[in-house]
Image (cartoon, helix red, strand yellow):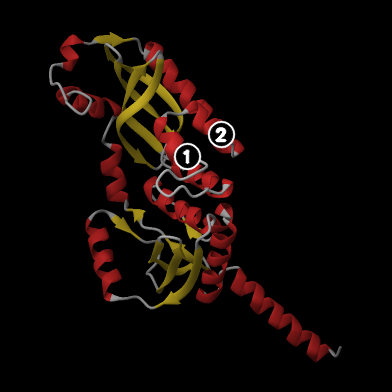
Amino acid sequence: MSNALKACAMLSLCAAVAACAGNSPDGLSSSLQKALTNGDVDGALALLDSPNIPSEQMFFYVNMLADCSNGATCTTKTVPLDEGFNKRLATQKQQGFDFAAAPEGLIQISVTGEGMKGSTTLPYAKVDGNYRILGAHLTAQKIAELQKETAQSKTEGLLKTGPGFRPDPEWKTHATALPPDGGEAGAALVALVKARTEAVKAGDVDKRIAVGDERDAIIYAAKSRATGKENSLKSRQIDMRSQAMRELADVKVLGGYQNGDTAILTIEGHDGHGWTMRGVQVMQQKNGKWSTEQADTVSSPAT
């Protein structure tokens, strides 16, 4: 092969690699489709400009891979910005969200499968020399607002109304103050979070179900209760990993109250996205086992 032909071949290879690496919008779209098709969570995360993206958004981003790993066909293509996106962007800015760079276009993700058909769009732009999918970041002002909310203020708010579907404002007057570690209920929460985190790291869905409650058995079931369809192991693992983004990965109990089989715990810790979580967690004892019920927490980037 002549030097000229070798040079052309190298240029073509470099162009292909650049496209796969996200150095063009179409390359970014292609890489995302590959990650969706393969259920490659790490690959999808590598395409995302993720600093200061709230954990709830990380959950939705990762969770979209679950359907694509469970029989659905997922395709991507680049489309231009539209008026609908611009309106959503204006609303997000009013709520304290913004992007690291000005969106240049959208990647449309279409999902088709048994009983499902729909599409969504994600903005993209060049960030630090590479095209990335943009997630809405919290602004510095919004982060400062969130950091002012404390675990104790969240606890006091719930104590004023009382926990449960039928709140009792007098709940605290009949409750007993717990020690700083939350007593038996606190120990149960710490053990649950630890076991749950270990299951996620190991990709062990069966362990996640075993240490959880009825909700976990439904979310991570091998067969859908609604359709009777088998859920692939990979899709269940993706569900588990996406949920972990917004769940406690570690926790410290700061105290609380107990009234009968119900305990209200003041907590702080970190979620699976690494953000600081603080607030209040309700625990319920059934048949000698403590399980989590309602919670009111606030998350912000770890400092």
Q: Is residue 71 above or below residue 252?
A: below
Provide the residue designation for mark 2. Answer: 206
Is residue 274 in view? no
Residue neighbourhood size for the residue with mark 1, other residues' Cα within 10 Å, grouped as few (<14), some (14–19), many (≥20): many
Give the side of residue 83 with respect to residue 128, left or right: left
- Circle on res. 90: none
Residue depicted at 83% across the width and 88% down the height: 3
**In what quadrant of the picture does the N terminus appear?**
bottom right
Residue 286 at x, y = what percent?
Answer: 36, 17
Residue 16 at x, y = what percent?
Answer: 65, 76
- Circle on res. 272: 1
Pick the front one: 86 or 64: 64
Pick the front one: 24 or 225: 225
User: Gap in Å between the C-alphas at discs 2 and 1?
Assistant: 19 Å
Residue depicted at 30% across the width and 69% down the height: 85
Residue depicted at 15% across the width and 24% down the height: 160
Amino acid at pointer 1 = Gly
